[in-house]
Amino acid sequence: MAVSISVVLLLVVLAVIFLRSGGLKLSHAVVCALLGFFLAGTSLAATIQDGLNATAGVVGSLKP
């Protein structure tokens, strides 16, 4: 759950930055958000979650 919240916050921050810089239009952001909501309801959601958890595990195990 903590990884999901962190990823969502990171994506929100990036979306705000892109919206302010003009690189992302509001309509594009809405389409991406809707895609994410619909994708979460499919059977592919578990695979995506496992991939994100594995990536977070690798990043978390790196020593600076």
Image (cartoon, grey):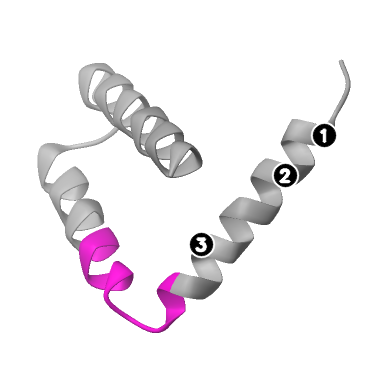
Asked if residue 56 lies left or right of residue 36, the reply is: right
| Residue 22 image position (x, y, % from top left) | 24, 24
Q: Which residue is mark 3?
A: 49
Q: Where's residue 57, x and y in %? A: 72, 44
Q: Three-letter amino acid code at disc 3? A: Gln
- Which residue shows up at 28% across the image and 60% down it? 36
Residue highlighted by disc 1 = 61
Mark 3 crowdedness (10 Å alpha carbons): few <14, some 14-19, many ≥20: some
- What percent of the width, then of the height, locates residue 33? 21, 52
For the residue pair 23 and 44, the one nearer the viewer reads as: 44
- Whether residues under marks 2 and 1 lie with C-beta atoms below 8 angstroms apart, the answer is yes
- What residue is pinned by disc 2? 57
Q: Are marks 3 and 1 in contact (CB under 8 Å)?
A: no
- Position of 36 with respect to 10 (left or right) is left
Give me the C-alpha separation between circle 2 and circle 1: 6 Å
Classify mark 3: helix, strand or loop: helix
Q: Residue at x 46, y 37 (%)?
A: 2
User: What type is the residue that disc 1 sits on?
Assistant: Ser
Q: Establish if 36 lies above or below 58.
A: below
- The residue range painted magenta reads 35-45
Q: Earlier in the sequence, mark 3 or mark 1?
A: 3
As helix, strand or loop, the secondary structure at mark 2 comes to helix
- Of helix, strand and loop, which one carries label 1? helix
Name the spot of residue 29 as percent of width and height, x first: 20, 44
Q: In the figure, is residue 14 to the left or right of 35? A: right
| Crowdedness near tag 2: few (<14), some (14–19) or many (≥20) residues, C-alpha within 10 Å | few
User: Closest to the observer: 30 or 10?
Assistant: 10
**Residue lying furthest front in this view?**
1
Q: Give the amino acid type for the residue marked by disc 2 in the picture.
A: Gly
